Amino acid sequence: MDRRQRKSREAIFKAFNSLLAKKNYHKITVQDIIDEADIGRTTFYSHFETKDELLKETCKTLFEHVFSGASNAACNHKFSNRNISTIITHMLYHLRYNQNNIIEILTCDNNHCVYQNDEMFLKFFQNNLNDFFRQYVTIKSQQNIPEEFLINHISGSFVNMVQWWLKGGLKETPEELTAYFEAVVYPILQLNDPS
């Protein structure tokens, strides 16, 4: 993409994130995005075929750094150890410090409103978590429990923990949340450190 195309694409993402912070995804129209981004309809459709494609790309962009960076325990975030606890903590720091408007997408303007967009957004998050935890899960118990069930279980627990944390105002530190998560999950699973 040339500079002009990148600028248009960034304007679309910014407009979409701004709209998601104010209203439910299903009530946002392509026209709303076009108006907010101050671009033409042709420009929008040259980047995205549908609003759903924009949503998918937004989610992918939001979590690309979290998951790829967490896997490498990126040095610029001052994480030197490469164990699963560090990786989980790294993810939580990205959520806490509102990287790329993650919090805005999960919340609304009004403190009294329900987190309207969390269902679709956290579903995408859980799918990414399933892939992520699949790298680290080993069945600890001798019981005949399918691995996919266990992966879905720990991903679902992580998503629920994040929802609880956001709705509670992010009072706990990422390190505290990691400790809570480990205390609940470690007794039933063995989480391997990445090699």
Image: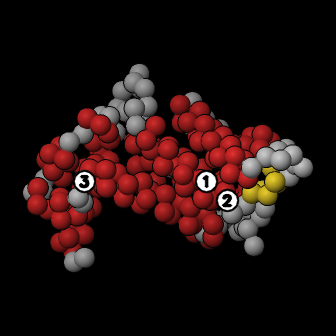
Label 1, secondary structure: give it: helix
Give the quarter of the image for residue 165: top right
Identity of the residue drawn at 32% across and 39% down: 25
Label 3, secondary structure: give it: loop
Q: Position of residue 140 (x, y in %)?
A: 86, 52
Q: Position of residue 162 (x, y in %)?
A: 58, 40
* Residue on which disc 2 sits: 134
Identity of the residue drawn at 18% across and 52% down: 37
Asked if residue 37 lies left or right of residue 152, the reply is left
* Residue on which disc 1 sits: 130
Identity of the residue drawn at 32% across and 34% down: 24
Asked if residue 119 lies left or right of residue 184, the reply is left
Name the residue nearer the viewer: 52 or 92. Answer: 52
Q: Are marks 2 and 1 in contact (CB under 8 Å)?
A: yes
Label 2, secondary structure: give it: helix
In the image, farthest residue toward the right: 142
Q: CA distance from mark 1 to mark 3?
A: 26 Å
Asked if residue 102 lies left or right of residue 25, the reply is right
Say which label, 1 or 3, has the lower sequence index: 3
